[in-house]
Image (cartoon, rainbow, N blue to C red):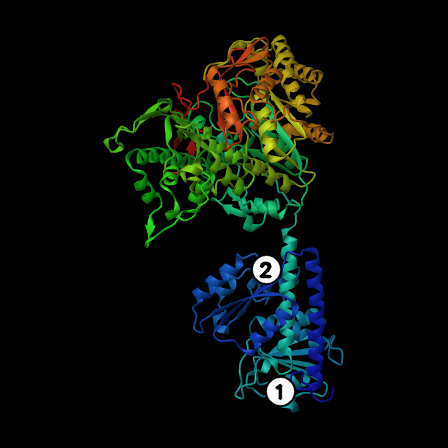
Amino acid sequence: MDGAGEFYGDVMCDTLTSLTSLEVVQSTKEAMVALQRRNPSVQPSLAIIQAGEEDSLLEINKKMAGKIGLNITQICLAKECSEDEIVEEVLKLNEDPRVHGVYLHLPLASLTSRVLDTLKPEKDIDGISDLNMGRLVRGDLSKGFVSPIASAVLNLLEKHDAPLEGKTVLLVGGEGTLGLALQCLIERSGMVALKSNWSSDSLQRQVMEADAVVLLGAGNIDVPSTWFRPGTAVIRCEPILETDAYGIETSSKSGLGYLTAAYRTQNVVHSCSRWIQEQQYRPWRLRSLRLQPLTPVPSDIEISRAQVPKPVDQLAAEIGLLPEELEAYGRSKAKVRLSLLDRLQSQPDGKYVLVAGITPTPLGEGKSTVTIGLVQALSAHLKLNSFACLRQPSQGPTFGVKGGAAGGGYAQVIPMEEFNLHLTGDIHAITAANNLVAAAIDARMLHEATQSDKALFNRLVPSVNGERRFSPIQISRLHRLGINKTDPASLTPQEVSTFVRLDLDPSKITWQRVVDTNDRFLRKITVGQASTEKGQIRETGFDIAVASEIMAILALADSLEDMRNRLARMVVGTSRSGQPVTTEDLGVSGALAVLMKDAIKPTLMQTLEGTPVFVHAGPFANIAHGNSSVLADKLALKLVGQDGFVVTEAGFGADIGMEKFFNIKCRASGLRPNVVVLVSTVRALKMHGGGPSVSAGAPLPKEYIDENLSLVADGCRSNLRKQIQIAHLFGVPVVVALNVFKTDTQAEIDLVCQIAKECGASDAVPCHHWAQGGRGSIELAQAVNEATSRPSNFQFLYNPEMPTAEKIRTIAQKVYGADDIELSAAAKAKIDYYNQQGYGSLPICMAKTHLSLSHMPDKKGAPTGFVLPIRDVRASVGGGFIYPLVGTMSTMPGLPTRPCFYDIDLDPVTEEITGLF
């Protein structure tokens, strides 16, 4: 090139720029085709925020984006728009997953630090944010973006006739991000970058000595051609378009604007590719927390408080969650969005481990503690991905007898105060939803009893601006009634009556109010006694909140839509004509879904050793199915990866929680367990071997403190053997975990492990997690890892199409060891009624004491020769099961003489809680 060879004014250089633009466009198109071949549903998208009218540079960028095939979103703000208006639009685009790049086509004065700091660096395709500039300076371009105009200038410099490597490039002007970006790129390409400004006294000398000159922000300043040496490459560029006196836009004189636009679209496609990569499964980078166990072991709350949990967003990043999948509730816990299931739908599930137990003493045998100790051992010590999935504890036991459920000793979920108290409000949401249904029932009965059909219809379908319209939920009711009309005026008087009257039979209302407190005086109450209720008096009662059918639904739903449908199917009572009345009939099911929309998301927490835990749902096992949620398990199984472990817990003994896990939860989820960890204690085995009764709050008899091999052996060969056999009914291998207490002797420990293996356990190991944390459960973790490597031949206990009575009989005989069942007249009538309503194919959820395999709490070991009495049968249609009542089962616990709340208090200065355990 002869003379100065200015790239912006010379035809040859225009041709060069056009050719370069074509090369960038072609390579970007090829990248686009490859991207969409792998991900046909993804369309790279560019969002442009502009101030004022369009200009030719904006048109160039839109034309280039169209040529590549990008989607374009254009946001037009007023020319004098405020910083707040710009920030508001940027924040919206940040959160829009369909947008992969944001182009701020704004005056320089509008590109304030606040605006640039607001823009997500991964969408900053112009590379002007502080983080992207920092990455460029550091030389890390794997995540950031380079300024398109800087890339265009560098490309032209590299294509200069004379190689410029080792030569000097003078940057004149450009004190902002463009000058810095160019300096970094030029130096990284092997050239020497010098900077000068327009007012420099030595500018002419510097220009004459340079091999290439880049004029930044020149505007109307004219640099004499005599200043340039022959062969010097000269590029004039503007970071923001300006119009000169002749109306010619200097940045596009030679096509530099086109080349810049080409690089900008290339950045959008790169951004989309990175976004797709971010959506893939991420290997864990879990940092475990160090434990330093003390002897003697301090109280649970002291241990919990001594460990500083990782910030929940840090934990989430370590296990492959994206920031947008997290909804933080403070520093230590967060909800996880269900969109994770869509993102990782092609990711194979990990291994599925169920922790169950032998029939417990009233003190509990430590299933939660074993669960937590096991995942601490797997992740913190064996370096295998693992997730614990636990139920949320009810406030009733926390303040009643049992205390909290965060584990114990050095195997806990932390912070244990947050785990045991309120958490993220799911139980409160259930309480609100449940009691909304109860209020709707009584209100509807009152209005039906005191109004005519016409008055009811006019209020249920009010005239708004002279027009009556059915709501969607009312149209659904009309369709269920066989009335296929949508115009309220077209209903006949008989259809109006059928539509407006649920005609609930007060004596057959099954729905009760709930509260999450042990309150025996609410078991039976009378409502409607105020004069305003016009004599609508009836007897009802309260259940504890976790006994609500809504809790069972939360635990079994596999999506928001599934939960909405289940909530709509809940039967609240029967009409006088014998028809079931649902929440959909009441018109309240949509509102229930609204109240539960956040509760459906599992809560992420961590163990003492920094391993992840999902806490979600908390139905009781003796009066419901007693398992944490299907969704928590499904999310965790995707996150741990194919070789990871998800450890979930079933309530009470294997005859109750495990049986329901297999027959109800696994049917609902489609998931199949690989192994059962059966928790046992020497204490419980001695009780089943003939030891004296154990009571909460009373000192343990000496038989439980002194060595007694005879009692241990008898307990192993009765209850432990039976629980192993129950697991084998479902074709799942069993590992027995002996939760060791300080009073256990080595001889007792060895005897339990020996007999457990003789009874069919794959392995049996002692666990010391309470005193040692995960290190004390390494042997258990190894046994579980070994057991999951063997094939599992899972099978259900019964076919759901069997008659209801036969399904109940199968459970009674094969699981409990009963000779037969005895159905009361009421139970038989209910079964017949449910069959008529089409509920006969639902699985069975037995409501039975957890203190014995039989219906008699004082019968320990493995009782035989008894007939199981079924006094009543009820239906949880939304939950999706029939629940027979065995004996008398209370759904509202009472407080003991000395509840746990006597010891719970708050330090008003430090706000620390004391007395929780």
- In this view, the residue farthest toward the left is 531
**Marks 2 and 1 close (CB-CB < 8 Å):** no
Label 2 element class: helix
Q: Amino acid at mark 1?
A: Gln
Q: Amino acid at mark 2?
A: Glu
Q: Nearer the viewer, residue 266 or 345?
A: 345
Viewed as shown, does residue 111 lie left or right of 502? Answer: right
What is the CA distance from the residue labelled 2 to the residue labelled 1? Answer: 41 Å
Q: Position of residue 540 (x, y in %)?
A: 36, 25
Which residue is identified by label 1?
204
Q: Nearer the viewer, residue 176 or 626?
A: 626
Q: Earlier in the sequence, mark 2 or mark 1?
A: 2
Q: Quadrant of residue 9?
A: bottom right
* Visible residue check, residue 910: no
Rendered position, 146 above or below 731: below
Viewed as shown, does residue 744 lie left or right of 877? Answer: right
Query: Would you call the spot at circle 1 few (<14 residues within 10 Å), some (14-19), or many (20 or more)?
Result: some
Viewed as shown, does residue 187 lie left or right of 549? Answer: right
- In this view, the residue farthest toward the right is 162
Label 1 element class: helix
Say which residue appears at 57% left-offset and 60% top-offset. Answer: 99
Which residue is identified by label 2?
122
Rendered position, 248 above or below 79: below
Q: Position of residue 273 (x, y in %)?
A: 66, 58
